[in-house]
Amino acid sequence: MTPLSQLQKYIQLPQVAGLAQRLFHGRGHAYQDLHHITIDWLPPVSLITLFAPVSLAEIEPLADYLFSILPNCSSVQLQHRYQLSGPIDVIRGKTIKQLTINEDNLRFNIRLGKARNTGLFLDMSNGRRWVQQHCQDKRVLNLFAYTCGFSVAAIAGNAKSVLNVDMSSAALNVGRENHRLNQHSLEQVRFEKLDIFKSFGRLKKRGPFDLLICDPPTLQKGSVDIARDYPKILRRLEQFMAPGATLLLCLNAPDLKRQFLIQHMAELAPQYTLSDEIKPPAVYVEAEEKGLKVLCFKHEIINIL
């Protein structure tokens, strides 16, 4: 196995001080024997995430290196994602469990050690930027909203309204905090704890919407199996989307290619055409096309003379 010391030459140092970003992405299998590790910069915390066990003796030199090269780094932490709860150890510096990070002109709450995920997926930063640039005066439906990162971007981009839907009230509560953190009025934002697959009638009543953001988990026991469930959403688009609507469809399932979305849209919603594809930041190098896929579709209005 390649020593972790060899990883240092692949680390992409922050180009803009103070902005959160991934520094190394081994999960794309583009670096030999390093597919089990990622490194994120969540100023002032550097977070090393392991997807397979590694000895502390190997990790400590990497932690020292990160502590020395990252500006104003005050904590290097190690998450064990191969364990069910994803526990986090502090390797160097201060114990920091809660912080606020910056992404572009937006701010988000991050919690370390409380759950497997930190509260924001950095690979979706370009998607949030796209939403902010394309939602002026639009009614936005944010499915699988999690902590409402897309909603924050939409309101920052002058969306007319946003409906956030998720099964986790705790995640939606963090979403409210994120909006308040950005000094957003909540008059235009709704948060609904719903099982999406049992709530299409509710969505119809709340609609129609001009922009759909759908970023589902790959698999959640008892609630979501995206290979099975994504088509359930796509075949019902006409119930709650407005004529001329735009779709931002996200797919993070390693075993499903972008063609999964393209084929199902052609079959279930042929009135939509593929209009754009949003790539993650360049650090997310993929050798096997198993990473994040984000496709935009536009509803074509046919004028009958």
Image (cartoon, rainbow, N blue to C red):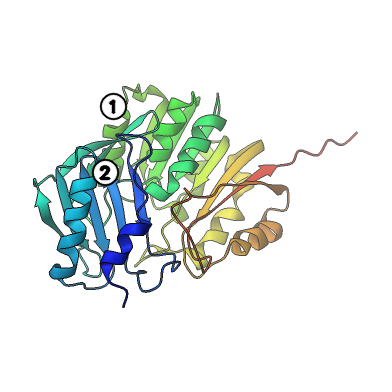
Closest to the observer, 187 or 200 = 187
Q: How far apart are marks 1 and 2 (CA)?
A: 20 Å
Q: Residue furthest right?
A: 305
Instruction: Please state which amino acid type lies under the numbered disc 2.
Output: Leu
The residue positioned 42% from the left and 25% from the top of the image is 188
As drawn, the label of residue 97 is: none
Q: Residues within 10 Å of mark 1 (few under 14, many from 20)?
A: some
Q: Do the residues labelled 1 and 2 touch (CB within 8 Å)?
A: no
Residue 253, relative to residue 154: is it above or below? below
Q: Earlier in the sequence, mark 1 or mark 2?
A: 2
Q: How many labels does the image show?
A: 2
Image position of 164 (left or right of 251): left
Q: Mark 1 or 2, which is nearer the eye?
A: 2
Above or below, 264 relative to 1: above
- Front residue of 230/63: it is 63
Q: Is mark 2 on a helix, strand or loop?
A: strand
Task: Give residue 157's position: percent from left, percent from top.
Answer: 48, 26
Q: Quadrant of the C terminus?
A: top right
Identify the disc placed on residue 42: 2
Name the mark on residue 180.
Answer: 1
Residue projecting furthest to the left:
94
Q: In this rendered view, identify the residue nearer to me: 232 or 69.
A: 69
* Residue 237, horizontal then vertical, whole percent: 61, 48
- Figure quadrant of residue 88: bottom left
Q: Which amino acid does label 1 sit on?
A: Arg
Q: What element carries label 1?
A: helix
Horizontal and vertical percent position of residue 207: 54, 36
